[in-house]
Image: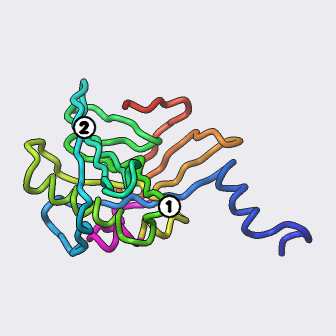
């Protein structure tokens, strides 16, 4: 039993920020499963921008609205084209793996499947249109991000493994993965892109 005045939710958030965080690693093989049937509303379009850098290729997918100047939804995919590990947010991106990261849906458009539409578009893009080889698409999803979990599962992504971040006063020290079990020292590890 917790001492009086300590809320379970507060304690959970405190532990997650300072000592320990659990994340889910979702994956999909492009073209293997496409259970999404959601389509863009009329007038909206998807803009794809590609940046080629040393060791990786970055794709930026944006849903544009005919009604506002801001993007409705944005997500990025980086493809590791090297034989070495690339790092982002304490996740090691493998060779020919595409990491989906920095996703955002404008609050006005939330609850309307715009992220699902982007995930579907990304799957189609890398299975049919892209000249870049991508063996697996991966997304790191925080344990409590239920909307993102639902969106990935709706599009056929499955949980490949769990990621456990061990922290010391909010600083990530170790990152452990469950399948196969492995760990990395990530203190002061910088993002590769």
In-image side of 38 versus 146 (left or right): left
Residue closest to the eye, 63 or 104: 63
Q: Can the viewer see residue 94 in this picture?
A: no
Find residue 157 and report its horizontal and vertical position in percent.
29, 66
Residue, x 45% and y 66% (percent of image)? 110
Find residue 154 and report its horizontal and vertical position in percent.
32, 74
Q: Can the viewer see residue 91 in this picture?
A: yes
Callout 2: helix, strand or loop? strand
Region in magenta: 150-162
Q: Residues within 10 Å of mark 2 (few under 14, many from 20)?
A: many
Q: Is residue 102 above or below residue 186?
A: below
Residue closest to the eye, 26 or 36: 36
The residue indicated by pointer 1 is 107
Q: Nearer the viewer, mark 2 or mark 1?
A: 1
The residue indicated by pointer 2 is 80
Taking the magenta stretch, the answer to whether it contains residue 160 is yes
Q: Residues within 10 Å of mark 1 (few under 14, many from 20)?
A: few
């Amino acid at each position: 039993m917790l001492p009086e005045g300590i809320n379970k939710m507060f304690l959970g958030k405190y532990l997650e920020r300072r000592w320990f965080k659990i994340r889910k690693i979702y994956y999909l093989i492009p073209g293997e499963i496409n259970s999404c049937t959601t389509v863009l509303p009329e007038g909206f379009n998807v803009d794809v921008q590609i940046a080629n850098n040393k060791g990786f290729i970055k794709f930026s997918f944006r849903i544009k609205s005919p009604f506002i100047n801001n993007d409705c939804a944005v997500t990025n995919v980086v493809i590791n084209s090297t034989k070495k590990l690339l790092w982002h947010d304490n996740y090691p991106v493998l060779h020919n793996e595409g990491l989906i990261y920095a996703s955002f849906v404008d609050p006005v458009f939330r609850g309307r499947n715009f992220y699902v539409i982007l995930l579907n578009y990304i799957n189609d893009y890398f299975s049919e249109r892209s000249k870049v080889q991508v063996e697996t698409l991966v997304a790191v999803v925080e344990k409590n991000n239920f909307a993102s979990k639902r969106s990935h599962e709706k599009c056929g992504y499955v949980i490949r493994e769990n990621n456990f971040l061990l922290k010391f006063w909010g600083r990530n020290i170790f990152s452990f993965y469950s399948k196969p079990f492995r760990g990395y020292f990530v203190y002061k590890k910088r993002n590769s892109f």
